[in-house]
Image (cartoon, grey):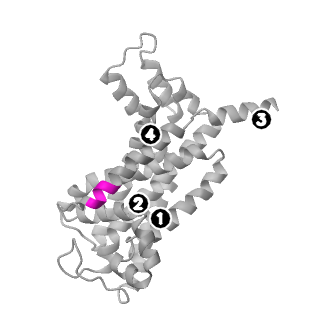
C-alpha cells in the first residue's frame, strides 16, 4: 500500500453522508495521518540519517574542541559542574525538533504543490483537526529521532538521570508542537516550494544560534547585551530550557508558559491563514492562462 493512499482510506471510512462524527472516526482520521507520515519517514532513510548526523557532529567534534575553552558554571538545573557535552545535549534535542518540524511543514508545501492535499480536502473533518493531526504526526517522528540520538549519546558516555529520559517526554512533545506549529504557520504563507526552503534556513539558524543551546545565557549576556535580548525574545530559547530542566525532573515554569503560549499562537495563526487548496487553485489558473 502506498503512503499517499492512506488519507484516501481515512476519507472513505468517514460517515460523510450522515454527518455523524464520533470519537472513533476522529481517531481513525488521526491514525491515518500519523501512519502516513511515519511510513513516509521510514521510506526516507536519508532523512533519518541526516537528522542524526547534525547533532552528532556537534556532540562528537565541536563539543570535544570547545570543552577546554567553554566551561559551564553551576547553573540550574545542574547541581555541580558539568561537561560541555552534557550541557549542549538538550540544545541538540531541540535542534532535532526544530529541523524535523520545518521538514514536516516542507512536506505539506510539497503535497500542496503536487496536488496531494485534495485527498485531505474531500474529508469532512474540520480543518483545525486535520492540521492538528499533521502536527501530531510530525511530532511523533521528531520524538523518535530525538530518542535515537539520545541512545547514541548514551553509548558515547553522555548520560542524563535515568528517569530524566521519561520526564523529558512531555517537554519534547510540547516543544515539538510549538516548532511544528511555527513551521505550519510559515508554510501557510509560502506559495512555492523553493521559497519555503529559503525561509527554513532563515528561521532555523538564527533561532538555533540565538539561544542557550550552545552557550549559557549568562555568558551571552556578558558577551553581548543585544544578543541576550534577542535570545530572550526567541521562543526556541524557552523550548531548550524546558527540555534541559525536564531531564532533571524539574519544571521551568516561565519556559513552560512561553512554549505553551507560542504553541497556541502559532497554531491559531496557521488555522486562520492556512488554505490547503491554494496550490491547486494556483496551478489551475496557470494552466488556464
The local secondary structure at tag 2 comes to: helix
**Residue 288, picture quadrant:** top right
Work out whether mark 4 precedes mark 2 in sequence or the reverse, and give the earlier one. 4
Work out whether mark 2 precedes mark 3 in sequence or the reverse, and give the earlier one. 2
Q: x and y percent of residue 257 in the render?
A: 29, 54
The local secondary structure at tag 1 comes to: helix
User: For the residues marked 3 and 1, what is the alpha-carbon distance in whole angstroms?
Assistant: 36 Å
Q: Using residue 193 as the reference point, say whether residue 123 is left or right of it.
A: left
Label ID, residue 69:
none
Q: x and y percent of residue 70 in the render?
A: 36, 86
Work out whether mark 3 precedes mark 1 in sequence or the reverse, and give the earlier one. 1
Q: Comparing marks 4 and 2, which lies closer to the viewer?
A: 2
Mark 2 lies on residue:
235
State the quadrant of the C terminus: top right
Mark 4 lies on residue:
134
Residue 144 visible in the displayed image: no
**Residue 165, picture quadrant:** bottom left
The residue nearer to you, when weighing 198 against 259, is: 259
Q: x and y percent of residue 11 in the render?
A: 47, 22
Mark 1 lies on residue:
207
What kind of secondary structure does the magenta stretch mostly adopt? Answer: helix
The residue shown at (46%, 52%) is 101
The residue shown at (37%, 72%) is 212
Range of magenta residues: 254-258
The residue shown at (35%, 60%) is 239
Total marks placed: 4
User: For the residues marked 4 and 2, what is the alpha-carbon distance in whole angstroms?
Assistant: 21 Å
Label ID, residue 286:
3
The local secondary structure at tag 3 comes to: helix
The local secondary structure at tag 4 comes to: helix
User: For the residues marked 3 and 4, what is the alpha-carbon distance in whole angstroms?
Assistant: 28 Å
Amino acid at each position: 500500500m502506498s503512503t499517499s493512499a492512506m488519507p484516501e482510506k481515512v476519507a472513505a471510512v468517514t460517515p460523510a453522508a450522515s454527518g455523524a462524527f464520533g470519537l472513533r472516526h476522529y481517531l481513525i482520521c488521526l491514525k491515518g495521518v500519523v501512519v502516513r507520515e511515519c511510513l513516509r519517514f521510514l521510506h526516507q532513510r536519508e532523512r533519518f540519517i541526516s537528522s542524526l548526523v547534525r547533532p552528532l557532529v556537534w556532540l562528537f567534534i565541536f563539543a570535544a574542541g570547545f570543552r577546554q575553552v567553554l566551561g559551564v558554571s553551576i547553573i540550574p538545573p545542574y547541581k555541580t559542574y558539568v561537561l560541555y557535552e552534557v550541557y549542549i545535549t538538550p540544545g541538540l534535542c531541540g535542534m532535532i525538533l526544530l529541523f524535523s518540524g520545518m521538514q514536516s511543514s516542507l512536506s505539506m508545501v510539497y503535497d500542496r504543490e503536487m496536488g496531494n492535499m485534495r485527498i485531505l480536502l474531500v474529508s469532512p473533518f474540520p480543518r483545525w483537526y486535520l492540521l492538528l493531526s499533521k502536527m501530531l504526526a510530525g511530532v511523533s517522528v521528531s520524538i523518535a529521532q530525538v530518542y535515537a540520538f539520545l541512545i547514541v549519546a548514551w553509548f558515547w558516555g553522555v548520560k542524563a538521570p535515568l528517569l530524566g529520559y521519561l520526564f523529558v517526554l512531555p517537554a519534547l512533545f510540547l516543544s515539538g508542537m510549538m516548532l511544528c506549529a511555527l513551521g505550519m504557520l510559515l508554510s501557510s504563507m509560502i506559495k512555492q516550494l523553493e521559497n519555503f526552503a529559503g525561509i527554513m534556513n532563515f528561521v532555523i539558524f538564527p533561532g538555533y544560534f540565538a539561544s542557550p543551546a550552545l552557550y549559557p545565557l549568562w555568558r551571552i549576556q556578558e558577551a553581548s547585551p543585544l544578543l541576550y535580548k534577542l535570545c530572550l525574545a526567541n521562543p526556541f530559547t524557552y523550548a531548550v530550557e524546558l527540555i534541559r530542566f525536564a531531564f532533571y525532573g524539574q519544571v521551568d515554569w516561565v519556559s513552560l508558559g512561553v512554549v505553551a503560549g507560542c504553541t497556541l499562537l502559532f497554531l491559531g495563526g496557521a488555522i486562520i491563514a492556512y488554505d490547503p487548496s491554494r496550490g491547486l487553485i494556483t496551478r489551475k489558473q496557470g494552466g488556464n492562462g
